Amino acid sequence: LNSVHCLSCWGFLIGVAMDDSQSSAAHVVLLGDSTIDNVCWTGHPLEVAAQLQEKLQEAKITNYAADGFTSTDLLQGAVPVISWSKRREVGDPFPDSGLDRNFAPLDALEGLEKPSHAVLSIGGNDVREILGNLGKLPEIIARFQANYTEILGRLLKSVPNCILMLQYRPSFYMDGGGYGVYQAIGSLPGPGSAVQKLNQLMETIYAPVLSEARKHKLVIADLPRTFDIFDDELYCCQIEPSAKGGALIATLLGHVVKHHDFSGPSKLLFIRDGEIVEEVNDGRPWSIPYDPNDEKSKESRLAGQGIDTEKYKQLCAMGFEPTRSLQSLQACNNDLEDAISQLTTPAEQS
């Protein structure tokens, strides 16, 4: 049976006693890519690390995630080019790593004094890098799974409580103006829509991860079943978590640190309809729900607001921020050219 705890998606717990003693002495180390290190996309203090710190105010948060890192980068070290300057600017710099700035997160973790928790979220960039050549996909999957096993082995030697975060699926409507994830995945042979093929790919990639989690009794933050791919407000540039998406992540991780029994069996936790759901990771096949009516439901909601859904998709595909696209279409009575003009006019001139 599922164990459900009610809360708002912005993290205010309702009817659940918060055990601050579990988080007051916690030292949480974040490891991964821009699913955690998203400050370049949201600004400070809306990034995941800052939102998690707000939820775990007595805890220490050490951010060793690096925007753009692959599983190989995390394992062997690399230069965190994307967020290096921004992280320094907001007071969350990477550790000093010498003149070459090569940052090896696992080495840095092993040099810390007794961290209590580690969050691991990695893998999306492994696939992103080959979207234009998916013939390499079997090789990339095999490398990722081998890297993940090695990363996890090192984590388990250094940190008593490990949280594995399965990465969310990208925004559906931002495909044209983003990385074209669904267009690329949809080109893979076999039946099914692009969404179905992506679901099946993630289920295949993560099967060994769930097996390792069962073996070591690890908790899993299940973002594929938390993020709604048709809710564009959860994303920036298709694959990055927005402030709203980051709030979901921080809510889930904060709940795990405060309330999860790490001595118990492996569990999957996700947010559904504003509630945290817990499922025992007991070996039953893990799958991402698919309903072909979900896209139609989103379009119906937009149509109910007087929005031309095809023009909204066009604006998202061009890379415009979803909320501003909706506002512009409403203000311009669905005139696409006027909406584009409004969206591209600097604020001080509009």
Image: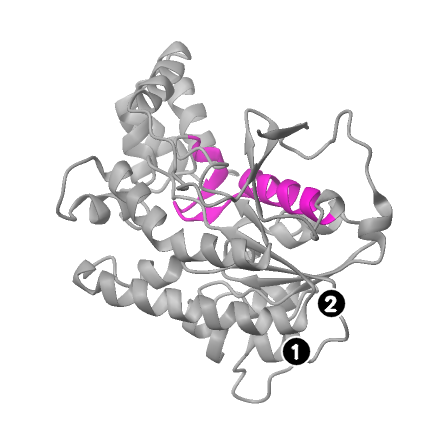
Report if residue 304 lies within the magenta region.
Answer: no
**Picture quarter with the N terminus:** top right
Instruction: Answer whether residue 245 is visible to the viewer in this image.
Output: yes
What residue appears at the point 23 percent right and 62 percent down from the top-left corner?
A: 138
- Left-right relation of 178 to 239: left
Question: Quick check: 251 above or below 82?
Answer: above
Amino acid type at circle 1 is Glu
- As drawn, which residue projects farthest toward the bottom? 99
Would you say the magenta stretch is mainly helix, strand or loop? Answer: helix
What residue appears at the point 82 percent right and 33 percent down from the top-left corner?
A: 17
Corner quadrant of residue 230: top left
What residue appears at the point 55 percent right and 24 percent down from the top-left corner?
A: 273
Residue at the disc numbered 2:
115
Which residues lie in the magenta part?
231-257
Q: Identify the mark at residue 110; answer none if there is no mark.
A: 1
- Left-right relation of 286 to 338: right
Instruction: Answer whether residue 335 is visible to the viewer in this image.
Output: no
- As drawn, which residue projects farthest toward the left? 189
Q: Position of residue 212 (x, y in %)?
A: 49, 59
Around disc 1, counting alpha carbons within 10 Å, would you say few (fewer than 14), some (14 to 19), or many (20 or more)? Answer: some
Corner quadrant of residue 111: bottom right
Q: Nearer the viewer, residue 335 or 180?
A: 180
